[in-house]
Amino acid sequence: MNSEIYRETILEHYANPVNAGDIPDADATARDFNPSCGDVVEIQAKFSDGIVKDIKFRGEGCAISQSSVDILLGIVKNKTIAEVENFTTEDFLEILGIELSPLRLKCALLGLNTLKTAVHTYLTRV
Ligand code: FES
């Protein structure tokens, strides 16, 4: 994919997120923000038999932070908790496939950091 297609993908997820919303009976909720801009992501997740059964987000922020979390949740939905725990920053950046400045890197990883917190919150409770 060339950078123009990546750009379009980011803008499409930003305009029409497929994983935005709430899970009223979520097993874990985590919220994080980017201190340099205040942009925020909250993730709610439902787990069953060690699988991410449902996962949604709410957030406010730049196109990269919000589209990245939308893409991320599409990747981890129906994966095992172990797979999510082992999913690295490098794995995610490879899938995103865009060149990011250090500032933009924080935007792109806001959702992943929040996801990891949600999983750890859940695991410390079960
Ligand atoms: Fe705030 Fe991107 S500018 S997360």
Image: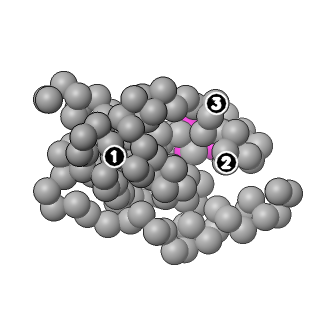
Q: Quadrant of the C terminus?
A: top left
Which residue is tagged 3?
A: 90
For numbered disc 1, what is the local secondary structure?
strand
Q: In which quarter of the image is the N terminus?
A: bottom right
For numbered disc 3, what is the local secondary structure?
helix
Q: Within 8 Å: ligand 1 and the Cβ of disc 1?
A: no
* x then y, percent, for residue 83: 45, 33
Relative to 57, residue 107 above or below:
above
Mark found first going from the N terminus, 2 or 3: 3
Mark found first going from the N terminus, 1 or 3: 1
* x then y, percent, for residue 74: 49, 56
Q: Which of 90 and 48 is in front in this view?
A: 48
* Extreme-right residue of the structure: 2
Three-letter amino acid code of the residue under disc 3: Glu
Marks 1 and 2, how far apart in space?
A: 21 Å
In the rendered structure, which segment of residues is drawn in magenta? Answer: 103-107
Q: In this view, does 85 lie to the left or right of 71?
A: left
Q: Residues within 10 Å of mark 3 (few under 14, many from 20)?
A: few
* x then y, percent, for residue 92: 60, 39
* x then y, percent, for residue 20: 38, 65
Which residue is tagged 2?
A: 96
Which residue is tagged 1?
A: 52
